Amino acid sequence: MMSISTKLNHYKMYINGEFKDSKSGENITVIDPSSGDKISTVPKATREEAREAIDAAYEAEKTWKKVPAAKRGSYLHACAEEIRKDKNHLIQMLQEEQGKIKSLATTEILFSADYFDYMASAARTYEGEILQSDNPNENIMIAKQPIGVAAGILPWNFPFFLIARKMGPALVTGNTIVMKPSSDTPNLALEFAKIVDKVGIPKGVVNFVTGPGSEIGDELSKNKKIGIISLTGSVGSGKKVMAAAAGHMAKVSLELGGKAPAIVCSDADIDLAVQSIIDSRVDNNGQLCNNCERIYVQKQIADEFIKKLSDKMSKITVGNPTKGDVGMGPLINQAALDKVAGMVDRAVKAGGRITAGGHKLSIENGFYFEPTVITNVKQDSEIVQDEIFGPVLPVLTFDTLDQAIDMANDSDFGLTSSIFTSNLDNAARAANELEDGETYINRFNFEAMNGSHSGWKESGIGGDDGKHGIEEFLNTHVIYLQGHPEMAKG
């Protein structure tokens, strides 16, 4: 009988234009969250290998920053073209290592290509200023110049798009970059390194190093050759990066957690609110910082809203997204599943009432949790105050909009929020009074690439997207150009 090979795919790091294994000889095993199967191995890099990548980026930046911005942008356009050519393969890889449903995996891959094109177009549009001087025959110019070497610490929930979000603005503005993908989802990053190599981006400009955050992430945060650390991750990780970066005063751009409130007023289109909130909760299997995490519904419509919400959540199909068309896939790993289940169990013990879902699901050996609605919870409870990062919606009620805004703002987080209303005054108050970086009115929670994605409070510092995201990767250089005063007399 012929034996079936069980050899796993193996991906190599990309440092200074070369694909490498770690000198440690150790690897990290990657798990398919939909099935629990082992699917690949990647190198477990050492701190010394992180330094090697940083040194390569540091040397490459001396030349890269002198390349005209339009030429730098052309490499991003080339990356976008290659992504589109290989989209089916990349979509499949994303589904396998992260558990996305196919429609969202497709969106992430193609949106990333569009994002590279968008950032490439900034090559001819980001600009400085010329100011009027008090002195004769003098020009005051404000130039925008690259910071130097950027570190990109990537999350597991959008492992492909966040490459584009960090690499695009960094490169087009003349920086080089070292990226550390999550150990849960490193495959796509190292596959993308093949595209970087194929399009001919100069050696050292883009580097990928895989390994634990305690070593690789720590080195990227502490190393004096790093000028900016851009991290998307947890509040805890952000605080560690910020503390480490303070040692050499590196700039930080941190997109951290969220606890997005949705306010549903009595004059809202209930069906629109229900569908938008569901779309904003189960997106990416409930694992998105923008996800709606808590609902405040006005008492007059609470019963109708909760019934419609619970009915629709109960009908969402859950399963392995690589084997069929489903509405939601798995959580990323066993720890994430246990965390979500534990929060729901504790909420029920405290008096919460489950109106949909509420349990783990046994599907293959994956990490699945039912889409869940829970009512009769308190504002100061764990499930209302702490980030769930799973498909669970706690629902509370309110009498007046003043109460709803106060409860919505009663949070350590401030990333996104939403309100559903047909009243212009309600919408205007939400826009002016909600303490979040983004507020969505009568729509689902998802940002535009030309907008600005930035959090308040513990949701982060700095931001991404649009011209403000580009500014994150630039230093301001003021130049006083004084001609000879006598020449001004003519």
Image (tube, grey):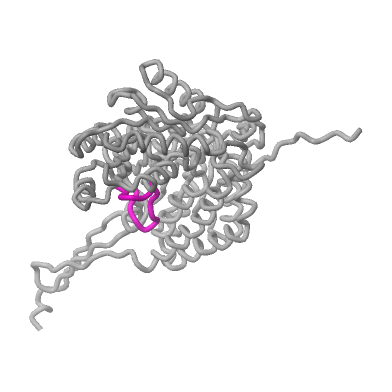
Q: Position of residue 209 (x, y in %)?
A: 53, 41
The one of 261 and 267 positioned closer to us in this rendering: 267
Q: Which residues are magenta?
A: 439-453
Residue 218 on image: x %, y %: 43, 33
Most extreme residue toward the bottom is 490
Taking the spot 40% from the left edge, 33% from the top edge, the residue there is 393
Q: Nearer the viewer, residue 126 or 278?
A: 278
400 to the left or right of 115: left
Task: Specify the quadrant that holds the C terminus.
Answer: bottom left
Task: Relative to 124, say whether 49 is above or below.
Answer: above
Spot the residue most to the right: 1
Residue 443 in magenta stretch: yes
Q: Position of residue 61 (x, y in %)?
A: 44, 54
| Left or right, 426 with reference to 34 | left
Q: Quadrant of residue 4?
A: top right
Q: Is residue 90 above or below residue 415?
A: below
- Tell me the quarter of the picture where residue 417 sits: top left
Identify the residue shown where x is 40% and y is 37%.
Answer: 221
41 with respect to 407 (left or right): right
Residue 142 is inside the magenta segment: no
Pinpoint residue 443: horizontal percent, then vertical percent: 36, 50
- Quick check: 70 above or below 350? below
Q: Main secondary structure of the magenta part?
A: loop
Does residue 438 appear in this view? no
